């Protein structure tokens, strides 16, 4: 409960600051005998690398992951898996402009207050989204475990600013290929409009928000501990622990509040001896437990806080000032957030799966 | 982590089925010396009692709470506080119609599958929203602790179906008086339209969803453990653990994804030596830590699953059938959910507060 | 972590003060489908009832247990099982003699200091060994689960004061029948000497300590999470959480520190294709993981603090005084502690078993 | 609960195998603003380095610790502190003799069984006492926090094999200087006899066990959560999580079971307005809560499993064989265990201290 861990049975504990020596994660509770090598993890990490697209920055970070423990002769041993990436050239920058000024929308002020002024201000320190690298690393292992049960997880960018995808324009195959385009979006028409939205934000030295959707397919029935550890509750926590998130919804979510029960209720039918839901407004979770239908989750990301446009703010010693946050910042976090959202869902599901196994007598 | 507890430092563990012997909660970790009597708790419980309004049912449940432990000579002793209410006449009903049929939208099917067919089907058993009584009881104690720090929590119905409040029509005082009307809504104009929405649903033997908003005022700065136990993450988990919830958002939430960073970022200014945020789009939480501004949370409730309208479904032995869920069901859960949402936010905040105190050396 | 719970997957949370309204336990995480009725639990509770023997008191407590939730149609449902016993005539006594005086060896002073003077002094309040009733109730369920895997747990009194059993005088069958004698001791010769020891203490208005041994037979190999949650570590915690305990040892324990490695190491041999340990100095646990041999644990109980002999002490307002703790107190806790020690080992093992199942992919 | 973490508020999570790439620890929950540098930690690590004395080996391990995160400008920031030491030349050895054979007394067999044959056999892998390096590193930080409250922790070797110290021969000052001698023993006379015991074991290609005592001075009153998380229970868990431990006792421990209550009870007196205990048989803990007196704990270490003497055992493919465990092994673990025992007590106490602070309203 010290704040830097998620999960009880499959547990990740992460460490590291944006511009510190290293970032990493300890994955504890991983079953033994899972084939694992650095390339398995690197593959997912590369999906969240700073892109060359419009939303991303021009930074080059290698983010090379190293396994320090828990794997022997190519397989997990059941002992903690330590994964680490060392930050390169982390001391070269000049931080004088942000050392004493609280950047609007950033965690500078809240960290300063919470930790009595002790704060690594370089690149946002611990509050930097660079921490999500460790989540993706842990999630890569979780995905391997889920794959053994046939469960597959795919995320994509649902909207950027005012531009949303049109669900008629794409299918599951397109979703599985989103990493082939820089916006991680399965709708080609939407991509064109999203690029306009991004360009407009860049011209205005501004940023935009968006929504990421993630889907788990081939789900097992019965995952999730009802009441306080509902599958939906765990997803809610996991998603809202990601940087820049301000909302999460499952199935119809907020739109469902405007539906009638007769529509929203997913009727069941038996066909050829098999149980079938006639719809999936619930997003695969009823009473906090998985129904076996696709788990469908959407996460709201606020517009990024770092903008070049001048903003009002204050200094550490309580003086009013103005700031332009310069540097190589993303315009919209959503494309890079897709693998992070996938990772968190994978980690939630592995925990639910292991907990369900624990009760099988 | 066994599923029926929330909170680490201020912990609630609840038990009981809808039509079983009793429902209750153990509150563990409560500081000693807090004045507490049954009336303190009953007062909040009465707010979630089945109402006489359009949204509620005509049931009469007394829900009388009894303190079994943890209080001595009118004050808490620091030991676990057991609160229990005994169900009255719980065995009088006939359950043959739901014993073998999975009600659409209900947790009947998922409990059946998760627990290998072992399920108390009477009134939904453990999956019934009657469990929220125990949350409200625990929350009443949490609120008393927060009150010592000056923190106040108020919830209200933001929308029912397609009818939402208009923020120009009410103020903080109206919010504080929402329990004076049966819809727990501070906007008199909206109430009239909401009643129409509810009547229309009743006529159609249907149900409607809605949104509850909850606000914590006079917040302390610095609450919430950044990264995995962000204040927002804990709120996300707590809210999505409530029955019938499908979404949660903080501050601007999903609407914020359409805003530009220059608008969404809450600028700070110093006035007369005091730090002031010029807006609160963040809903009082930045980087997972409270800013001191109001914490603003909205929770999406789906339309209730129990409707009198005929629906397709299946039986336990996999036969297709139809069901009309008769009985005294609410049409919309939102009015009765308001004290539940308040309770969960109170419990989250007490935990964050205690954890922050633990680090003060 | 709030202090009144043990176990993560199979979790007990207890509440209640010695002379309060009620004592109880919530058992969370119990698998569904286990046959369970009140008699199953009462049977074990009756083993810890105040005895008629020399070690015990002449009190009569009925300690009738009631199941409030979690069981339906005679089987567990996977939801929390609430067990409660209501205290009878709890308000009849006069507590003026202990209200303001700290009894030596009791938790009066430490509770007073920890909880800022808020303390239910009646019968020791929460610090009373009456709380162990709730452990035994929870343990009765744990034993039923272990029995499904063939694991059996038996405890007995190993020594009282200076009198210890002689292992040549009894066998496993005698151990299984210890509840037939009031000292819960399998060695008839030792019983005679123990009775003398107890009589001598009674005459001197004094109390004696002792050692309880507990053995788990038909163990599975591989239980226990190495490093911090070693099976031995969990046993250490569980046993030292019992009232009046001051030590715990596994296998040879402290005596083993005087052995040479060549003797202490348990050699292995294969006979007829089966693995056999040639000795069990390790007490069934190596590297924190069960070997499959019997788990053997001994727990040290201090002499009971309540004695009629006059002792020096102080009052709440810091005055020196003398006290004779009168009333119906046990002379030695060990006989009544046997079912408590069994219960705690059962709960530890069920947790280890469930955790091991969680990793089986 | 995944097995490689200890502590809730001040949490350590360790990773690494004996001959793997690296060993390390993440310390989470450390308050901000504590001055910390690598030398602070290295100082304690050097105390557990393989010695040159009779009990130790002739290995040279540098065990240089590196801080990867959580410290900025010489002070802790409240974010996770990652400490790591890289193993040198870890791949040079030949492991063919132990790859397929289970060494008696070692965790080879139990790990093999628990993890389905997936096991890093090199130097014992994760089961090696080399892991305790990470505990000492974490404990060094815990000690710094305790020092702020005035609490000091000192351990020493109480006995080796049949040779125990004589408490008349040394005082607190001698205890504070034990790191000046290789046996970490404050009794000069005992050291001579212990050396004989060790020499005798070496000649016989054997090993010996022993007892380590640890004392916390200047304790605060009121630490420890009564019932399941008693201070004694936490100490029990922490100590029995250390490699090669088979017992733990507090205060008089097992010897106390032979005392009468009138002797064992620690009477209290007020002198000059100050509360004084007239004895400390309880070892500073009553009812699971600290009394303010010294916390006194003893831990039993079995004779080390690695001995050069030939022993019977079996191979992985279930054949009988014999083994001589050659290499540079310690003869007795106790001297090197002293800083480990100190570290674990420090970590327990910091957690208890933080939890107590959390309740101060």
Image (cartoon, coloured by chain):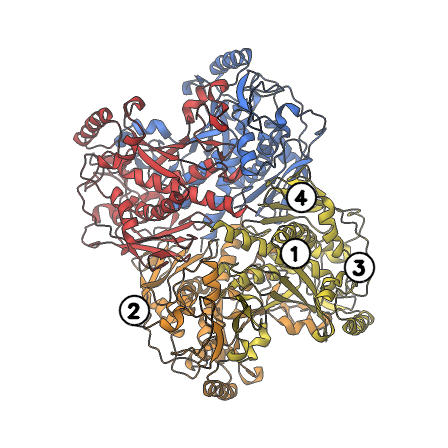
Chain colours: A yellow, B orange, C red, D blue
Label whose residue precedes the other's in the sequence (1 or 3): 3
The reply to whether dot 1 and dot 4 touch (C-beta < 8 Å) is no
Secondary structure of residue under mark 1: helix
Side of B225 relative to C84 (left or right): right
Kindly identify the residue that appears in the image at 42 percent across and 50 percent down. Answer: C11
**To which residue does mark 3 refer?**
A51
Side of C204 relative to A79 (left or right): left
- Judged by depth in the image, the label closer to the viewer, 1 or 3, is 1
Kindly identify the residue that appears in the image at 65 percent across and 56 percent down. Answer: A343
- Using the image, tell me which numbered label, if any, was put on residue B91: 2
> Where A346 falls versus D250 (above or below)?
below
Label whose residue precedes the other's in the sequence (4 or 3): 4
Secondary structure of residue under mark 3: loop
| In front of the other: C193 or B135 | C193
The reply to whether dot 4 and dot 3 touch (C-beta < 8 Å) is no
Residue B189 seen in this snapshot:
yes
Q: CA distance from mark 1 to mark 3?
A: 19 Å
**To which residue does mark 4 refer?**
A35
- Judged by depth in the image, the label closer to the viewer, 2 or 3, is 2
Q: CA distance from mark 1 to mark 4?
A: 18 Å
Q: CA distance from mark 2 to mark 3?
A: 63 Å
């Amino acid at each position: 409960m010290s704040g830097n861990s998620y999960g009880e049975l499959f547990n990740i504990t992460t460490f590291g600051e944006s511009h510190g020596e290293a970032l990493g994660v300890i994955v504890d509770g991983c079953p033994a005998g899972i084939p694992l090598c650095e390339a398995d993890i690197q593959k997912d990490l590369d999906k969240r690398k700073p892109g060359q697209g419009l939303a991303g920055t021009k930074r080059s970070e290698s983010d090379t992951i190293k396994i320090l423990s828990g794997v022997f002769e190519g397989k997990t041993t059941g002992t903690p898996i330590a994964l680490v990436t060392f930050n390169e050239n982390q001391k070269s920058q000049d931080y004088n402009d942000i050392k004493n000024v609280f950047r609007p929308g950033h965690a500078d002020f809240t960290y300063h207050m919470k930790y009595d002024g002790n704060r690594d201000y370089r690149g946002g320190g611990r509050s930097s989204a660079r921490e999500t690298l460790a989540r993706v690393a842990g999630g890569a292992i979780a995905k391997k475990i889920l794959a053994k049960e046939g469960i597959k997880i795919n995320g994509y960018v649902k909207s950027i600013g005012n531009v949303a995808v049109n669900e008629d324009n794409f299918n599951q195959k397109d979703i599985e290929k989103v990493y082939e385009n820089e916006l991680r979006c399965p709708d080609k028409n939407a991509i064109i409009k999203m690029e306009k939205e991004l360009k407009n934000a860049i011209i205005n030295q501004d940023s935009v928000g968006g929504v990421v959707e993630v889907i788990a397919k081939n789900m097992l029935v019965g995952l999730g501990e009802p009441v306080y550890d509902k599958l939906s509750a765990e997803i809610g926590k996991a998603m809202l622990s990601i940087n820049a998130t301000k909302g999460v919804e499952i199935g119809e979510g907020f739109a469902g509040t405007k539906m009638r029960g007769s529509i929203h209720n997913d009727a069941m039918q038996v066909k050829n001896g098999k149980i079938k839901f006639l719809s999936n407004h619930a997003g695969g979770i009823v009473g906090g437990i998985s129904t076996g239908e696709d788990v469908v989750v959407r996460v709201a990301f606020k517009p990024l806080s770092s903008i070049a446009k001048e903003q009002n703010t204050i200094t550490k010693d309580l003086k009013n000032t103005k700031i332009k946050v310069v540097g190589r910042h993303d315009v919209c976090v959503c494309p890079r957030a897709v693998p992070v959202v996938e990772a968190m869902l994978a980690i939630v599901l592995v925990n639910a799966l292991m907990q369900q196994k624990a009760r099988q007598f």
